[in-house]
Image: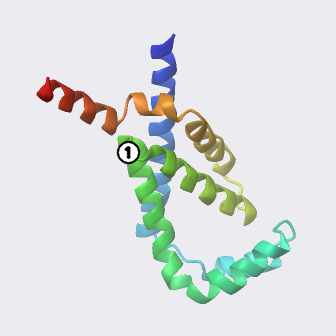
């Protein structure tokens, strides 16, 4: 039963990592721009007012910076989850990104991804069983002993 749990944890971690990695890659190579999104968020009825103000005062004046930070962050989160390195922190940043996407009223696959990141953050012990760190520790123990 434990092996099944670990395999399910591995699948959730790798699939979540793959999806966010691909989103970052598509943004990086596909001409991702926040300039049009600023106006859409400002006119959106479903976006909270405080988020509109945040977007207008923090994101909009620095769109060039954020157009690089967002895709690179998604790429790093994806790599960390796929290889199993700092997966808890990657999941927390993934939750942060998905909540921002939902606040901007961009509802695509983000609710499903949000659930995946929450599962990763809540089951971190299971996620770490099959990870880069656990494999490294196994090899170090074999060399030492």
Q: Is residue 5 above or below residue 82?
A: above
In the rendered image, the vertical position of residue 34 relative to residue 136, given as above or below? below
Name the residue beneath numbered marker 1.
Answer: 85
Of helix, strand and loop, which one carries label 1? loop
**Residue that appears at 46% across and 44% down:** 87
Question: Residue at 48% of width from left, 59% of height from top?
Answer: 74
Picture coordinates of residue 107, whole percent (x, y): 71, 55
Q: Along the line of sight, which residue is nearer the eye, 2 or 140? A: 140
Residue furthest toward the top? 1
How crowded pointer 1 is (Cα within 10 Å; few <14, some 14-19, many 20+) is rated as some
**x and y percentages locating residue 38 in the rendered image:** 69, 80
Which quadrant does the C terminus fall into?
Answer: top left
- In the rendered structure, the answer to whether residue 73 lies left or right of residue 59 reads left
Q: Vertically, is 37 above or below 74?
A: below
Q: Is residue 97 left or right of residue 140?
A: right
Image point 81% across, 74% down: which residue? Answer: 50
The image shows residue 125 at horizontal and vertical percentages of 49, 31
Can residue 11 be seen in the rendering of this structure? no
The picture places residue 142, in percent across and down from the top left corner, at 16, 24
Q: Nearer the viewer, residue 70 or 142?
A: 142
């Amino acid at each position: 039963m434990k092996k099944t749990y670990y395999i399910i944890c591995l699948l959730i971690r790798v699939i979540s990592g793959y999806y966010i990695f691909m989103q970052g890659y598509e943004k990086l190579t596909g001409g991702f721009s926040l300039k049009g999104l600023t106006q859409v968020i400002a006119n959106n009825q479903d976006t909270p007012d405080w988020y509109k103000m945040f977007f207008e005062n923090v994101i909009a004046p620095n769109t060039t910076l954020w157009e690089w930070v967002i895709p690179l962050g998604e790429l790093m989160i994806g790599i960390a989850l796929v290889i199993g390195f700092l997966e808890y922190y990657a999941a927390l940043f993934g939750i942060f990104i998905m909540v921002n996407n939902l606040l901007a009223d961009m509802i695509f696959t983000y609710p499903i991804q949000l659930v995946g990141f929450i599962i990763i953050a809540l089951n971190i012990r299971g996620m770490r069983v099959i990870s880069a760190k656990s494999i490294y520790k196994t090899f170090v123990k074999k060399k030492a002993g």
